[in-house]
Image (cartoon, rainbow, N blue to C red):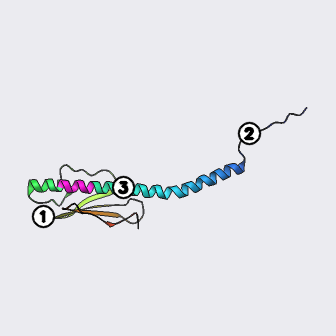
Amino acid sequence: MGHSVRHSGFTLIELLITIAVMSALVVIALPQYSRYMARARQQDAKAQLMAIQQAQEAYKLQYGSYTSTVSALTGWKATQGRYTFSITSAAAGTFAAQASGNVDSDATNDVWTIDQDGALLNTTNDIDS
């Protein structure tokens, strides 16, 4: 008497199709996720620049003019991230601060500036370059 044995499981073709579909999803989703993360990093830089602008106003109230170094600012500390922050110009009534960083690991740096009026400007957009 012969017993038929039935094996359950996946065939090689089913596994290859599953791997192909998953690979296609990753290829589509990864660039979108990277762009999302880069935009989140830009938001952090903008928030830091606004904090620098507020700290500059406090410095001006105390000393009568803006400072030319971020280390002189109290109430502001740079977060760990991909951007570096600097004061590019400062005088009695004006200042400009800059955030520069590589948000997506290419050759271009993302550059944001802010002035004494709180005007934020993305001078070099690393995401769209």
Residue 72 versus residue 6: which sits nearer the camera? 6
Q: Which residue is mark 3?
A: 41
Q: Secondary structure at mark 1?
A: loop
Depicted 56 relative to depicted 11: above or below:
below
Residue 85 lies in the magenta stretch? no
Point out the tag, 2 or 3, that comes first from the N-terminus.
2
The answer to which image quadrant residue 109 occupies is bottom left
How many numbered marks are there? 3
Instruction: Give the percent coordinates (x, y) of residue 5.
Output: 81, 36
- Which residue is painted at 47% across and 57% down in the image? 32
Point out the tag, 3 or 1, that comes first from the N-terminus.
3
Mark 2: few, some, or many residues within 10 Å (few <14, many ≥20)? few
What's the mark number on residue 71?
none
- Which residue is painted at 8% across and 58% down in the image? 64
Indicate the amino acid at tag 3. Answer: Arg
Point out the tag, 1 or 2, that comes first from the N-terminus.
2
What's the mark number on residue 8?
2
Q: Separation of disc 1 and disc 2 at Cα?
A: 78 Å
Indicate the amino acid at tag 1. Answer: Gly
The answer to which image quadrant residue 87 occupies is bottom left
Q: Which residue is mark 1?
A: 93
* Side of 65 relative to 113 (left or right): left
